[in-house]
Image (spheres, helix red, strand yellow):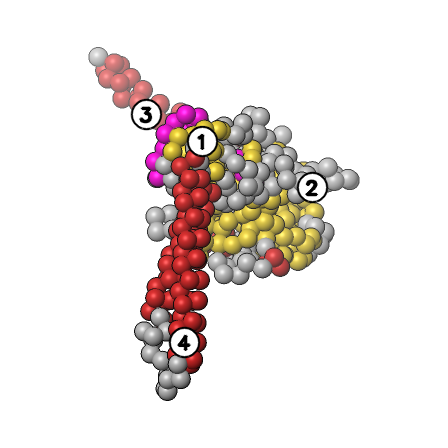
Amino acid sequence: MRIRKFFRFLLPLGIVLVSILVVVGLVMVAKGKRPERVETGGQAILVEAIPAEMTSLNFSVYSQGSVEPRTETTLVAEVAGQIVSVSPNFISGGFFRQGEVLLQIDPSDYETALLRAQANLASRKARMADEKARSEQALKDWINLGREGEPSDLVLRKPQLAEAQAGVQAAEAELQEAERDLQRTRIRVPYDGLVRSKLVDIGQYVAPGTPLGVTFAIETAEIRLPLSGSDLAYLDLPSATRLDRAHRVPVTLAADTAGLGGRWRAEIVRTEGVVDPSSRVVYAVAEVVDPYGVLGQSDQPELIVGTFVRAEIQGLRADDVVVLPRSVLRPDSTVLIANEQRMLEIRPVTVARAEPRDVFISSGIEEGELVVTTSMDAPIPGTRLAISGENPAPSNVAGNGTEGAVATTGVDQ
């Protein structure tokens, strides 16, 4: 019993002593093999870089819109009658020349009215001649009778002569009206154009005000291009009243619609002079000469009215700027530079313009300097860099990482 109690007391004490010895031994071993810190501050990070190139250019502003005719006409009958002839060109999509008769309304009634007006005018002129002769004869009779003083207007038949003259003027007005009505039986348009829609045909009776069709001129076409306030800052646009050719702005149009693709030259000829109240944009109007190429004024591909086009507008001139990918510009308007010693610099720059793909730097970068294009999350100025593709490559190069200089620890073997 005593031995059992002795072991119950001695066993826990032995376990504690053994544990202390083990810990002491481990500490002594650890002191004998302490790791040393290895500094790697000279390690270079492999990055991509591009040389800065100075250039001069015109900024481009992009917009879009639909091609529309500058002049469009809804043809309406001015006289009543039956349509007796229709031009072969008066069809949807038909081209016609200036002054060509597109429709002929039955002119017989109006030819009769013209003859009646001519006869009435001749009668009124004869009466006026008769009254004039009577007035002259009355003056001669007054003189031959030796009467003193001036004869009265009644004696000289001046009221009757004035009435005859008024009758002639009325007859002339009736004649002009009859001639105009006869001319209105022939439907013409005062420009070279194209028929958008045809609403009547031969044999149909029309009354004054009846729509006959819709046509538009093909001499020029226009595209309304919406521009925001930021776009206007890079353009020198003609005002709504300054329409001289010297202030027109070149535009390049492009379309990718199936069967309607191509590129066209155009010019901005005016702005609409107002800000759209709903979208807060200003519309500039670009003009294309001879869009269908049928007037001999253009050698460009056919540009069909209604085509949706993208527009590249030539903007203001910029000299000595560096064009870089948009991704190299940091949020604080700085870029990363690899200097001549291939050390990292964080350089503030002046941005002339930033686009979705490119950024235009006007100052802060010199010609030939290497701009780092590799993304670095936490760049540290002075970090050694190795430029990809540059020879000779540094002997101690880190992988294409996103941090600056690093330090590692190792254990002596």
Is 90 positioned to the left or the right of 44 in the image?
A: left
Separation (CA) of disc 1 from disc 3: 112 Å
Asked whether the residues under the numbered discs 1 and 3 touch, taking CB atoms below 8 Å apart as contact, a structural biologist would say no
Where residue 75 sits in the image (x, y, percent)? 43, 38
Q: Could you tell me which secondary element the residue under label 2 belongs to?
A: strand
Location of mark 3 (residue): 13
Say which residue label 4 marks: 141
Most foreground residue, 127 or 60: 127
Which mark, by number, is residue 387?
2
Identify the element where label 4 is drawn. Answer: helix
Q: The C terminus lies in which quarter of the figure?
A: top right
Q: Residue furthest right?
A: 392
Tell me which segment is drawn in magenta: 192-208
Q: Is residue 9 left or right of residue 150?
A: left
Q: Is residue 347 above or below residue 220?
A: below
**Hey, what amino acid is under mark 4?**
Asp
Sequence-wise first label, 3 or 2: 3
> CA separation, marks 4 and 3?
174 Å
Q: Position of residue 175 (x, y in %)?
A: 43, 50
Which residue is drawn at the image coordinates 40% and 70% (left, top)? 135
Measured Cα–Cα span from mark 1 to mark 2: 66 Å
* Disc on the earlier residue, 4 or 1: 4
The image quarter containing residue 83 is: top left
Does the stretch in magenta take in 261? no
- Nearer the observer: mark 1 or 2; the answer is 1
Q: Is residue 209 visible?
A: yes
Q: Nearer the viewer, mark 2 or mark 4?
A: 4
Task: For mark 1, give the secondary structure.
Answer: strand
Label 2–label 4 contact, CB within 8 A:
no
Read off the residue under disc 1. 197
Q: Disc 2 and disc 4: Cα gap in Å?
A: 123 Å
Disc 4 versus disc 1: nearer the observer: 4
